Amino acid sequence: MSQKRKLEEVKEILTPLSQSNFKYFYRRSTAPESIEEFTAALDGFVRAYLTVNRHYGDDTYDVYSTIMFDLKIRSKIVSEYDKSFAKDENRQTALNKAAQKMWTSDESFCTGRHKYKLFSMMNEAIRMDHKDMMTPLAILTRAINKLCLYNSDVFPRKGLCFRGGGMMLCHRDFFVERKTYRVPGFLATSFSNDIANGFME
């Protein structure tokens, strides 16, 4: 099944967040309490994502590159956790920082058709809302949100942040100053224009 066909099927089953599988599993999940639980959720999500996408005909995954992709991200998570823990930060703070390191990872693996990065896989999974991906995805989301869902006194100058990505020109006129809209997934932004540009390269 082509990518276009997959997107068409996804559009047909789109539901409001309140009725989504993601919301159902998210409400019943908790943030990981150990690095082992964290990496198990990562492994589970990558496996579930590949299994679901094989259903849609994208079976060109190279097993070796997929395993290396998983191991590289896992290595970054554990390294960040160990570094934070060594600074006498508590276990939960160390896990929270490891989650941020995972989310911002630029590691990728390629198939014959696509190039995959973890943050794009997670956002696609949220949009697809396939129940087989939701349990590990909800745990990873809880971990990421630990450092996202809090009030901060630090805001970017003029409230301006930057997004490294692209879109079809036909959608560009929708995005005007002061527009309010909901994003079905994580919207990664940076206070730095240079960092945003780096994700577009």
Image (cartoon, helix red, strand yellow):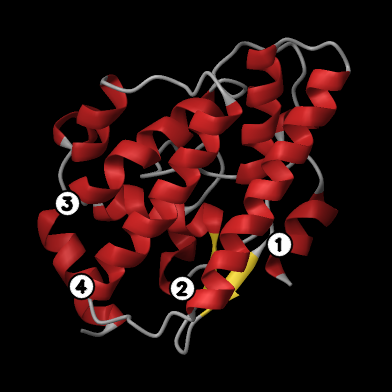
Q: Which mark is residue 14?
A: 3
Query: Residue sitting at 54 percent across and 53 percent down?
Result: 119
Residue sitting at the far right: 87
- What residue did someone put label 4 on? 55
Q: Nearer the viewer, mark 2 or mark 4?
A: 4
Q: Secondary structure at mark 3?
A: loop
The amino acid type of the residue labelled 1 equals Phe
Residue 146 occupies which quadrant of the picture? top right
Query: Residue sitting at 46 percent across and 26 percent down?
Result: 142
Asked if residue 15 lies left or right of residue 91, the reply is: left
Q: Earlier in the sequence, mark 3 or mark 1?
A: 3
Instruction: Give neighbour class at mark 2: few <14, some 14-19, many 20+ (Cα, 10 Å).
Output: few
Q: Is residue 112 visible?
A: yes
Residue 49: x %, y % from top left: 35, 59
The amino acid type of the residue labelled 3 equals Leu
Q: Secondary structure at mark 1?
A: helix
Q: CA distance from mark 3 to mark 1?
A: 28 Å
Asked whether 75 or 190 is in front, the reply is: 75
28 up-or-down from 13: above or below: above
- What residue did someone put label 1 on? 199
Q: CA distance from mark 3 to mark 4?
A: 18 Å
Q: Nearer the viewer, mark 4 or mark 1?
A: 4
Q: CA distance from mark 4 to mark 1?
A: 29 Å
The quarter of the picture where the N terminus appears is bottom left
Residue 4: x %, y % from top left: 26, 80
The answer to whether the residue labelled 3 contacts the one labelled 2, judged by CB atoms less than 8 Å apart, is no
